Amino acid sequence: MPGGSHQYIIGWPAKIASGRLCRVAQPGTSDADVHWLSAAVELSKRCSPSATAFSVGAVLVGADGALLTDGYSRELDPADHAEEVALAKIGLPAASGSGSVTGMAEATLYSSLEPCAARTSRPAPCADLIIASGVGRVVIAWREPPIFVPGGGAARLRAAGVAVTTLPELAHAARAVNAHLLR
Ligand SMILES: [Zn+2]
């Protein structure tokens, strides 16, 4: 594929095993973080439109730079949030003590929006699902504005020991997908 470093693979699981392109960027470097968070923003453009919920994309990347899973808002159900879809596709959060997915402490979840700390449609907000999954690091493009529910997901994650990084250079792109909600 031409273009190199900013190509990425969306789709799980069929494309993960198909090529090396899903291992182009190991999380933790700034280039890799921009790469994967850009992939999450691109994914958010697949969300079916909603007047009452944000469009969000999320990708989970292992320490070796492998794409583990991805998801976007309303992907499988109208109430879905991107982060919970991505985690659920690989069975997370796992039943307590099952240890079915290893390497989560070293994995990074990239989300185009700050994970929610409160929600009305499901019992658990995404911040709690991420904490329960054992993911060690979260990278976001922008903080959740208090339009539908209060923000605070980043603070909740940090309080649980999850490292949270914001990449403000991608905030504009992530917000643009939700421009109709921000007027
Ligand atoms: Zn959420």
Image (spheres, helix red, strand yellow):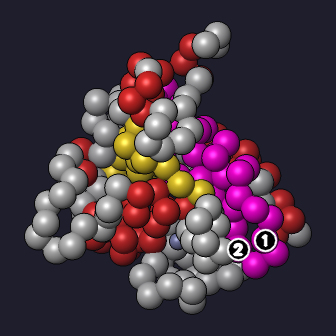
* Label 2 – label 1 distance at C-alpha: 6 Å
Residue wearing tag 1: 50
Image quarter where the N terminus lies is top right
Q: Which residue lies at the image location 53% right of the left edge and 54% below the top edge?
A: 71
Q: Position of residue 62 (x, y in %)?
A: 31, 39
Is the residue marked 1 within 8 Å of ligand 1, measured from its CB? no
Assess disc 2: are there few (<14), some (14-19) or many (≥20) residues with their C-alpha within 10 Å of its C-alpha: some
Q: Which residue lies at the image location 67% right of the left edge and 42% below the top edge?
A: 42
Image quarter where the C terminus lies is bottom right
Of residue 138 and residue 42, the one placed in the foreground of this image is 42
Amino acid tagged 2: Ala
Q: Residue furthest left?
A: 97
37 relative to 17 in the view: left or right = right
Image quadrant where residue 142 sits: bottom right
Q: Position of residue 67 (x, y in %)?
A: 41, 37
Q: Is residue 165 among what the camera can see? A: no
Is the residue marked 2 within 8 Å of ligand 1, measured from its CB? no
Q: Are marks 2 and 1 in contact (CB under 8 Å)?
A: yes
Of residue 156 and residue 18, the one placed in the foreground of this image is 18
Q: For residue 52: magenta?
A: yes
Q: Say what secondary structure mark 2 lies in.
A: loop
Q: Which residue lies at the image location 46% right of the left edge and 57% below the top edge?
A: 86
Q: Position of residue 100 (x, y in %)?
A: 18, 58
Of residue 94 and residue 31, the one placed in the foreground of this image is 94
Q: Height in image: 90 above or below 11?
A: below
Residue wearing tag 2: 53
Q: For residue 134: magenta?
A: no
Amino acid tagged 1: Ser
Q: Residue furthest front?
A: 14
Numbered range of the magenta stretch: 31-59
Q: Which residue lies at the image location 46% right of the left edge and 78% below the top edge?
A: 125
